[in-house]
Image (cartoon, helix red, strand yellow):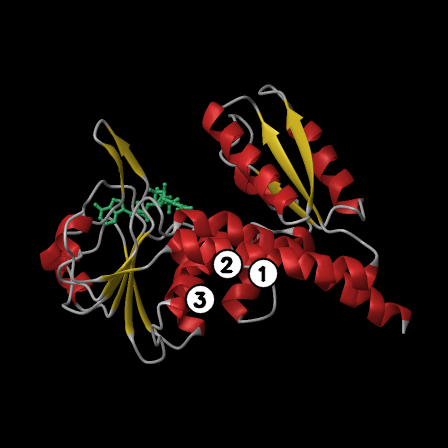
Amino acid sequence: MQAVSAEIIDGKAIAAKVRAEVAGDVEAFVQRTGRRPGLATILVGDDPASAIYVGGKQKASREVGIEPFDHRLPADATTEQVEALIAQLNADDTVSGILCQLPVPEPLDGVAITGLIDARKDVDGLTPVSAGLLALGRTGLRPATPSGVMVLLEEAGVELEGTRAVVIGRSNLFGKPMAQLLLGANATVTIAHSRTRDLPAVCREADVLIAAVGRDRMVKADWVKPGATVIDVGINRSDDGLHGDVDFAEVADVASAITPVPGGVGPMTIAMLLRNTLTAAELVASEQEVGAA
Ligand code: NAP
């Protein structure tokens, strides 16, 4: 292992801690309400990578005491079939959270399908209602990966208030909600993308630099302000293994803290999905308690 000057933010260990906390909180919830939170996953088609992701989410749910419900539809399922399944799960009290694994096969419209999920069960935080609540700073379910990054920053002791943060990438899945969460924590946020002029100079402004692009080791040492915190969301598979969007070997000598790939942001996503499922169950339970009072 090469010597690096930056603190390595250990996402695997932090995710394990979150999962253990969720497991304890799930049992306390069951004791209090007599109900077990449930997570329904929907997989349309037989894409092997998607099947592995869904299987991982099912297993992780079971491990923390959340009941997994595994729903599969054939690749040629119609929009009406998917709609009917989501309507059934929206109405099912044993289901606290619903996620539809993306992408869905064409001609299905993943954004439209996701939008059918009841916002109170939207554990991926991707419906227009959840996105709107986040933009307004109101209580709601937040997308798992950017939420996981917020936990990593907190665990690494990064003070966000007043800091300059740059997010590379503006996807609905990650970049936009990440920027909103940082803004909510009083950072001054820049969102960079493929049309940004002089990206390295923009990145050098950042005290906190977050890369979510999907380009193997794009962020180089001379893009990074000395002492910055660097969070690498990218997952790029190549012949020589799995790499992030950040050239870890170079950047770890400039940054003060950095996430590795693998073992950084990746493990946080499932941990935060589990946390969201419990939060969804708690929101419904508190509504019922208020209704019954
Ligand atoms: P995406 O939807 O493809 O978005 C990529 C973003 O990067 C776009 O906003 C794009 O800009 C921007 N971009 C592309 N080339 C660029 C360049 N040369 N310079 C600057 N910006 C550029 O991807 P995503 O879903 O956000 O995911 C991004 C990466 O994170 C992927 O590697 C993905 O696998 C990974 N990811 C990991 C997790 C996890 O759990 N660890 C979760 C989600 C995503 P335009 O908008 O201008 O096209």
Callout 1: SS:
helix
Residue 69: image location, x then y, percent? 70, 37
User: As displayed, is residue 252 above or below residue 234?
Assistant: below
Residue bearing the label numbered 2: 17
Disc 3/disc 1 C-alpha distance (Å): 22 Å
Label 1 crowd bin: few (<14), some (14–19), many (20+), radius 10 Å: some
Label 3 crowd bin: few (<14), some (14–19), many (20+), radius 10 Å: many
Residue 153: image location, x then y, percent? 37, 66
For this rendering, which residue is in front, 130 or 291?
291
Residue 109 visible in the snapshot: no
Q: Which of marks 2 and 3 is nearer the N terminus?
A: 2
Disc 1/disc 2 C-alpha distance (Å): 6 Å
Residue 17 visible in the snapshot: yes
User: As displayed, is residue 262 above or below residue 21?
Assistant: above
Residue 90: image location, x then y, percent? 74, 45
Q: Residue furthest bottom?
A: 162
Callout 3: SS:
helix
Q: Are marks 3 and 1 in contact (CB under 8 Å)?
A: no
Rendering quarter of residue 21:
bottom right
What residue is rendered at 68% in x and 48% in y? 65
Which quarter is ligand 1 in? top left
- On residue 21, which mark appears? 1
Rendering quarter of residue 26:
bottom right
What residue is rendered at 74% in x and 61% in y? 29
Q: Which residue lies furthest to the right in this view?
A: 292
Residue 82: image location, x then y, percent? 67, 31
